[in-house]
Amino acid sequence: MRVTLEIPDEMAAWVASQGQNLSRAALEALAIEGYRSGALTPLQTRLMMGFDIRYELDQFLRKHQVWEHAYDLEDLEQDQETIRQLRAEGRLLIG
């Protein structure tokens, strides 16, 4: 989907002077705020940014100093449940 934003020319010039692509900077800002606020899940944020794996999202979030939802207790519990299921099915290759 294409979205059009109108911003002051001075702001566009400033973003460009920082070596950023204006469209990419706007997309990143939207993704970061959506993630921080909880409006976007990690998966939605990853897909919005075009990242193939969660590690890329984690790197992106660290680069922008976003820590709130990087990995929380719910993620840990979900990972533990996945490990239990894989063990029960005999599909866990380690430990």
Image: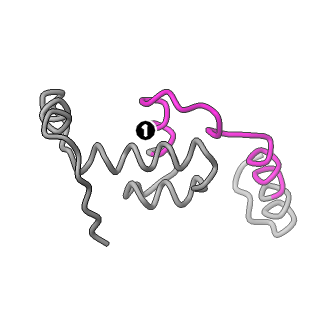
Q: Position of residue 64 (x, y in %)?
A: 44, 30
Q: Is residue 77 left or right of residue 41?
A: right
The residue shown at (37%, 45%) is 28
> How does the figure colour the protein chain or chains?
one colour
Q: Main secondary structure of the magenta part?
A: helix
- The residue nearer to you, when weighing 54 against 92, is 54
Quarter holding the N terminus? bottom left
Question: Is 75 contained in the magenta span?
Answer: yes
Q: Name the residue located 74 percent from the left edge and 48 percent from the top edge.
A: 75
11 lies above or below 28: above
Amino acid type indicated by mark 1? Phe
In the rendered structure, the answer to whether residue 42 lies left or right of residue 72 reads left
Where residue 67 appears, as percent x and y from the top left, is 60, 31
Would residue 66 appear left or right of 89 to someone viewing this image? left
In the rendered structure, the answer to whether residue 25 lies left or right of residue 32 reads left
Q: Residue furthest bottom?
A: 1
Label 1 residue SS: helix
For the residue pair 22 and 46, the one nearer the viewer reads as: 22
Residue topped by disc 1: 60
Range of the magenta residues? 57-81
The answer to whether 64 is drawn above or below residue 31 in the figure is: above
**Residue 56's quadrant in the figure?**
top left
- The percent position of residue 25, horizontal first and vertical second, equals 28, 43
Residue at x 56%, y 47% (from the top left corner): 35
Depicted 37 relative to depicted 39: above or below: above
Q: Is residue 33 magenta?
A: no
